[in-house]
């Protein structure tokens, strides 16, 4: 994923916003990542990714990890939502036009 790709597809929070939030705010718990424009509080799909970003930043001072492409990420989220894993809020990136 690139810095301007969305991590939280429900609230359109980009990786860049999250990286800067980690750098500036220095959250103490992974759950505090939600303070960055509500990331992780919609369908819940990105919570695992947010936790991984947090751990990487806290443990190594780095926010890079092996990442899926934006298309792979959107497909995985669509499968998650279709399987009943969460409900995206109004205004979220739709799953209807994402192929399985």
Image (cartoon, rainbow, N blue to C red):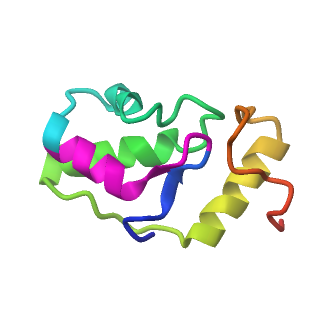
Q: Is residue 80 above or below residue 26?
A: below
Q: Nearer the viewer, residue 72 or 97?
A: 97
- On the image, the x and y values in percent for residue 81 come to 77, 43
Stretch of the chain drawn in magenta: 10-23
Q: Residue at x 33, y 57 (%)?
A: 16
Q: Nearer the viewer, residue 40 or 36?
A: 36
Q: Residue at x 40, y 68 (%)?
A: 66
Q: Residue at x 13, y 53 (%)?
A: 61
- On the image, the x and y values in percent for residue 12 come to 54, 48
Q: Nearer the viewer, residue 31 or 39?
A: 39
Q: Is residue 73 above or below residue 9?
A: below
> Residue 12 colored magenta?
yes
Position of the C terminus by quadrant? bottom right
> Residue 8 colored magenta?
no
Give the overall secondary structure of the magenta segment. Answer: helix
Describe residue 41's horizontal placement relative to residue 99 as left or right: left
């Amino acid at each position: 994923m690139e810095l301007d790709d969305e991590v939280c597809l429900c609230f359109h929070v980009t990786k860049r916003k999250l990286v800067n939030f980690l750098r500036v705010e220095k959250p103490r718990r992974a759950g505090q990542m939600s303070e960055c424009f509500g990331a992780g509080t919609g369908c819940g799909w990105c919570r695992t990714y947010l936790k991984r970003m947090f751990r990487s930043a806290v443990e190594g001072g780095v926010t890079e990890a092996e990442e899926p492409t934006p298309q792979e990420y959107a497909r995985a989220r669509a499968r998650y939502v279709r399987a009943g894993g969460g409900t995206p809020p109004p205004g979220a990136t739709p799953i209807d036009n994402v192929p399985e």
